[in-house]
Amino acid sequence: MMLLPFLKQIASFMRLLLWMNKYEMNYNGGKGRKCEELIMLKKVSFLVIILSMLFASSAFAYNVQLQPFKDEENDYARDPIYTLSALGIINGYEDRTYRPNADLTREAFIKLLVMASQLETATIGTIPAGVAKDRWSAPFISVAYEHQWIDSLLDQNGSFDPAQTITRQEVAMLVGKALLDSEKDEVRQQWLATDWKKERDIRAFKDQSAIDADMQPYVYYAASRGIMEGDLAGFKPKESLIRKQAAAVIYRLIDKRVSEEKVDFTGFYAISSYGAINQMNKLTDVILGWSHMEYSSAGFATLKTSSQTSKTVNVIPSGYVEALTAADSAQITKELMVFYDNSNLKDFLKDKIAQTAFIESLMTTLNEPDYSFTGVSIDFEGLLKEESAADYITFLQDLKKQLGTYTLSVAVPPIYYYKGYDLKEIGELADTVILMAHDFTDSQLPSAPLPLVNDTIVTALQVIPKEKLVLGISKQANQWITSNGATASPVIPAIADVEKRLAMQSVVKTWSMPYFLAKAEFADERGSHVMYYEDTQSIDKKIWLAKFYELKGVSLWQMGNYTAADWELIGKQSSRGSSNSGL
């Protein structure tokens, strides 16, 4: 549905071309100056169509790094470089190189450190002499200066040289100070008084005397935390740090914090999820995809939990009691999901009579004691126009008033194209906002490349408190088949089929950067295939991302798609622990 605005534009151009063709044939056999102008207009219009189509399908339609660096190296720094690039902490150059072996300046590393620490840089505070307020790095240097991180880097006149190449001891000192800032005061004081000397003696770097005395306590703290270590030759304190080493240091610094965190998981129990019923002990919440809205005529709408047609799978399944019992045994909350994605959703949001009828029918179901729902999750999809945003908020406000003690979660898509979702207002109304950071395949991309997932989170966090935001992960694969030079629209194969295919020796499997997704390539009688897959490794990376931003949690769409390996990972990452495997 994201392609709709582009398709409408292209359709308009095509109608114009058809009219011009007809006019050209009827105008003196195509002769004359006006006809020449018309032919030129046709050429220009055709070019516009081509450019529009290319823009719509190009990864460059998004302002994030979606192409690999031309000079990437498959070594220890590859994952750190692409992770930090996805986070927007590091950047490449305009020629799409990263230049991993180039030296790094002091100001460049300070920027990385401040961004990794997620410190505010919107305003420039106090800055040291030697740094102009209009210098690109001034906001980052100001933060570091006010935190007293760069005191050891000032000359005798109190001046700071931001363009000077940074050394290993300077990097370790800066990292050590940043780490100690996050410690309790008694821990910090104990380290600075005596503990750093113990670390120095244990490590016994051959060149420890070459480390500046005032930097040593902090250098050894960075070493004690495993962020920077020496080798048999020593610590090499005066050696310059290159760009890929800096990426590795910053990533290690973030990962030390993130890896210690646990996550609250919300599972969507919907569409053949029975196989995962015993996994609810790993969840904090379950959302039961058992209902949909029916709105077929003005003035009438109702909640439906069954269906006489095959149009929807969002119905209460037979044996539903077993799922509710499992949720109760796991002591987790149970929200009822209401799904709707018909094109007349915008009309429903202007139909107050229909909305009133729908809310009444929803409340009747929520109040049914046999279900014991604790809340409702609204998943209304497809609002493209900004004009629908206010109407949607009004509907949610009316619903919220009726819910009483029931919780309200609201699913929202990325707002690149879907302008009908006022994230700020939704964030204020809802108890939880589930960010569906996936389904980017309209641009010939996999469903959820990590840079776009990150960008979607950053956009949402501008107006939604992190305590309310849940990162939605969709377990799926996206497959493109090319035959006779033509590539068909992507398909979403069943997870079981994907797993079988990946086990075949004829499949070439790689780890795709900067997408952070599994990639599989193979050929058969249908043609050549390219498939991107949300496997356990890529899910782990998205959980890592949610922990980096300290989000409320992660949601899993839908539980039945997740494999045994996925659930093992989720158990390890879950705030509820992994004592019971469920398998």
Image: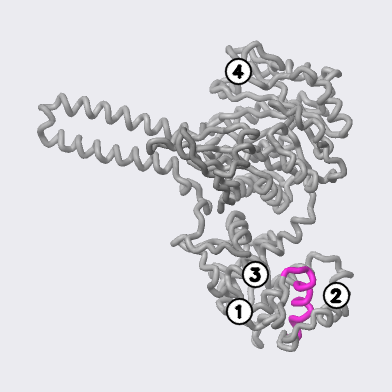
In this rendering, the count of numbered labels is 4
* Residue 543 screen position, x and y as percent: 71, 48
Image mark for residue 142:
3
Q: Earlier in the sequence, mark 2 or mark 3?
A: 3
Which quadrant of the structure image shows residue 533? top right
Q: Label 4, on which residue?
A: 311
Left or right of residue 8: residue 429: right
Q: Earlier in the sequence, mark 1 or mark 3?
A: 3
Q: Label 2, on which residue?
A: 191
Under circle 1, the secondary element is loop
Tag 3: residue type?
Ser
Task: Point out the frontmost of discs 1 and 3.
Answer: 1
Under circle 4, the secondary element is loop
Front-lying residue, 540 or 376: 540
Left or right of residue 7: residue 558: right
- Mark 3 touching mark 4, by CB under 8 A? no
Write the start and end of the magenta stretch as one range: 212-227
Q: Label 1, on which residue?
A: 240
Under circle 2, the secondary element is helix
Which quadrant of the structure image shows residue 197? bottom right
Tag 2: residue type?
Trp
Answer above or below: position of 458 versus 53. Answer: below
In three-dimensional space, the C-alpha distance between marks 3 and 4, rounded to whole angstroms, equals 58 Å
Answer above or below: position of 86 versus 163. Answer: above
The C terminus, quarter of image: top right
Magenta residue check for 220: yes
